[in-house]
Amino acid sequence: MSLFGLGNRNQKTFRPKKNAPSGNKGAQLKRHIDATLGSGNLREAVRLPVGEDFNEWLAVNTVDFFNQVNILYGTLIEFCTPTTCPTMSAGPKFEYRWADGVQIKKPIEVSAPKYVEYLMDWIEAQLDDESIFPQKLGAPFPPNFKDVVKTIFKRLFRVYAHIYHSHFQKIVNLKEEAHLNTCFKHFTLFTWEFRLIDKAELAPLNELVESIILAY
């Protein structure tokens, strides 16, 4: 059984689910997220709990949203192929190229599935790096932690933008649009609460983003 009740149908998770950072308050904060989500109050689910550390909250939610996007995209991998999606796009006006600044320093044009593969590998490497996402109790977060998280969320948004623009009808056919919309609402409210994505980056889904923010 997967997150948010997607069930086993078409369950091709892109990669194994990551666990919340364990040595700090990760598990406790994850339970808080699950409890507030279970109440249906998305606005409450994104707020920093009273007395909790901001970086801890960012870290646990980054893992959570990575898992959500991972599962969502996993339902589409047989439909999102180099043939159907030769570029990583979000409608006719937006195309994304890949660079990680280390192995690929100059942005390159790749297919959508290749972009997502590069992205998930890159995020997973960040999550596994204890100098960025510390696992031990009391270990410090790096000074640029929020900047690292902002880049992760900016790139996760691009996967949502691609799904909505290129695969929404398939999501409807799979009867998973309610799940997609709930995940994206949660993602949007969290990134808006902590100003994690610049407004210009939201342009491909601007109307949807604004409708979510106004509704909450």
Image (cartoon, rainbow, N blue to C red):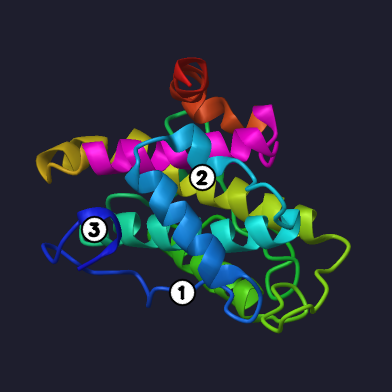
Q: Which residues are magenta?
A: 178-199
Q: Quadrant of residue 111?
A: bottom left
Question: Would you name the residue on which mark 3 appears?
Answer: 75
Question: Would you name the residue on which mark 1 appears?
Answer: 18
Front-most of 31 and 167?
A: 31
Relative to 162, does residue 79 appear above or below in the rendering?
Answer: below
Q: Secondary structure at mark 2?
A: helix
Q: Main secondary structure of the magenta part?
A: helix
Distance from disc 1 to disc 2, alpha carbons, whole Å, reads 20 Å
Distance from disc 3 to disc 2, alpha carbons, whole Å, reads 17 Å
Q: Quadrant of residue 198?
A: top right
Mark carried by residue 158: 2
- Mark toward the start of the polypeptide (1 vs 2): 1
Q: Amino acid at mark 3?
A: Thr
Q: Secondary structure at mark 3?
A: loop
Residue 197: x and y in percent read 66, 39
Front-most of 21 and 192?
A: 21
Q: Amino acid at mark 1?
A: Lys
Magenta region includes residue 182: yes
Residue furthest front as drawn: 51
